[in-house]
Image: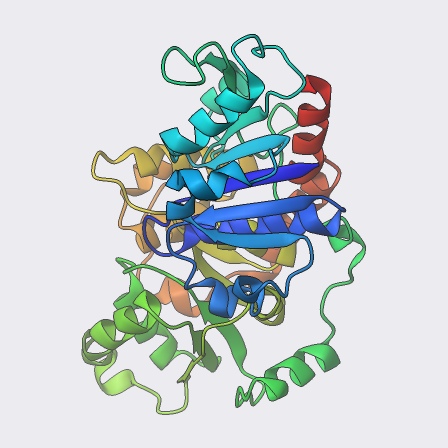
Amino acid sequence: MLWDVFCRVIDNFGDIGVCWRLCADLAHRGHTVRLWVDDSSALAWMAPGARDKQWPGVTVLDWNQASNTDFLQHLPPADVWIEGFGCDIATEFIAARAHTTGAGGINSPQTPVWVNLEYLSAEGYVERCHALPSPVMQGPAKGWTKHFYYPGFTTGTGGLLREPALPQQPDMSDATRAEWLAAHHVPWAGERLVSLFCYEPAALANALAAWMQADTPTLLLVTPGRAAQAIEAALPTAREQAGPHLRPDALRLHHLPALSHPDFDALLHACDLNLVRGEDSLVRALWAGKPFIWHIYPQDDGAHADKLAAFLDCMGANNTVRQLHAAWNGLPTSALGAATLPGGSGWAALPLAPWQAQVHSWRTRLRAQPDLVSTLIGFVQKRR
């Protein structure tokens, strides 16, 4: 089928990260995809060559072209429209398709299957709202129907983005890890490896101070952008907290360049602990099967606390994991169902072995469920 996927980049490039993985997976399965995006700059490092038509099956188009009536006149009609995260398709684009479909084409095979792909959440409303229809009440597509489509962690949702071959891929061996790190110029000397992809975590200075004093040395791999800026801001406080107990070789920092999606995924597989943020990297951390802490996107109304609590409930997280998530996100432990807030020592003595076993168990359950692209294709086929 031919798919139109629409994406507006709000901030932090999580929107385009998810939409690009969706497009790439569809193309890998033999579909043809047009990605309409208002800022494709991140694809230069996420998917090198994608903007230059070097990615088979995917064409990247400028968002404004969807309003260009001359351009739309010669555009083959798509079978599916995907609105990423509730972005609104241009009225001109909708009108061009409605005009070619005709007034009597509301239930016509030529009418596209129109899907609003929602944000990922483990909250209860997701199963209740997944796949519900939403009649279009006005505009050139009046009488058509959109459907809400929710990714999720249960069989009552659309599932998670997961390439078909991913469940068969073995975990990264020690030799492969060393090769990948060397190929990316990471000066690893056998320390505990921690990746940092975050906003501005409330407990970052505390964690750095704990690692600076720890008996187990840590190599912190810092991604560019907000994570690197957060490190720079937190280091003076961390050094002050460590004080005379600071061990010169206990914590080393290595700043990474922007990584493509395959390399970012490999980074998560290579590390002993992954500090991730947003939606896309959370899912990739799950597939990596390593201990992780999720820095959820903070919302002014505090709704992110309920969202994080629901995720930890769905995962079956133990008290320690809940404590660390509360500290990292600057939330009361009670908001996440944890008993007490860990001190700085909690970051130095991370219980990685039982934590990894827990993540592995959940990953096994999630792998047994249908993935997002498979369920989405099935959903579309039924409506065509």
The quadrant of the image that shows the N terminus is: top right
Q: Is residue 361 above or below residue 44?
A: above
Give the x, y percent position of residue 108.
Answer: 64, 13
**Left or right, residue 79 beside residue 381:** left
**Left or right, residue 314 beside residue 224:** right
Give the x, y percent position of residue 298.
Answer: 29, 45
Q: Residue 113 lies in what quarter of the image? A: top right
**Quick one: 254 or 163, which is closer to the camera?**
163
Q: What coloring was used for the rendering?
A: rainbow
**Quick one: 42 or 238, which is closer to the camera?**
42
Tell me how many marks there are. Answer: 0
- Residue at horizontal 65%, vertical 43%? 362
**Left or right, residue 333 beside residue 189:** left
Q: Residue 337 lies in what quarter of the image? A: top left
Q: Is residue 42 above or below residue 58?
A: below
The quadrant of the image that shows the C terminus is: top right
**Left or right, residue 383 beside residue 351:** right
- Residue at horizontal 57%, vertical 63%? 50
**Quick one: 250 or 65, which is closer to the camera?**
65
Residue sitting farthest toward the right = 168
Give the x, y percent position of residue 77.
Answer: 60, 33
Q: Is residue 138 above or below residue 45?
A: above
- Residue at horizontal 53%, vertical 27%? 115
Give the x, y percent position of residue 349.
Answer: 45, 67
Q: Visible in this render: residue 382? A: yes
Q: Visible in this render: residue 286? A: no
